[in-house]
Image (cartoon, rainbow, N blue to C red):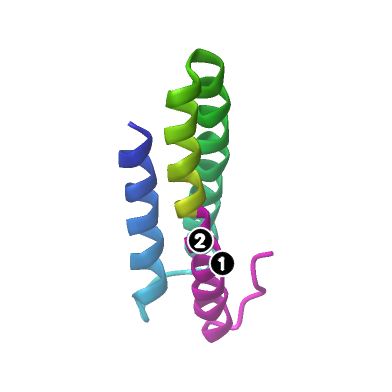
Amino acid sequence: MFAVSGCQTSSQLTAAVSDEEGVSCGEIRQAFQAYERDRQSAQALKELSLMLSPSAGAYAAEGIESAEGYYEQIRISTNLALATRGCDPVR
């Protein structure tokens, strides 16, 4: 379920950033915030998995680490989309 949720918010964020017309700064921010909430959920999944099984925790940690590599790219793309609309960046 986590993977589906993460993919959905990532897709929403990508669509918001690439759409040059009709997407407000608020909508871009909402998509980015949803992505950040997914990241927090992933950390909770990792912690729960570690409590249940060290091997399950290791798999969860591996997935989270590879996903972390995309965060900076997504943040930069989000800020670029916001800047082109004259809006303040996300931090």
Indicate the position of residue 81 as horizontal and vertical percent values.
Answer: 49, 78
Indicate the position of residue 62 as horizontal and vertical percent values.
Answer: 46, 43
Question: Could you tell whether 20 is left or right of 57 in the image?
Answer: left
Whether residue 44 appears in magenta in the rendering, the answer is no
Give the magenta part as a residue range.
68-91
Question: Of all residues shown, which one is farthest toward the top?
Answer: 52
Indicate the position of residue 23 as horizontal and vertical percent values.
Answer: 41, 70
Task: Give the residue drawn at x 56%, y 16%.
Answer: 51
Do labels 1 and 2 touch, CB within 8 Å?
Answer: yes
58 and 42: which is toward the camera? 58
Dominant secondary-structure state across the stretch colored magenta: helix
Relative height, residue 36 to residue 23 (above, below): above
Task: Give the residue drawn at x 58%, y 82%.
Answer: 83
For marks 1 and 2, give the one nearer the viewer: 2
Q: In the picture, which quadrant includes the N terminus?
A: top left
* Residue occupied by mark 2: 69
Residue type, numbered disc 1 = Glu
Q: Secondary structure at mark 2?
A: helix
Disc marking residue 72: 1
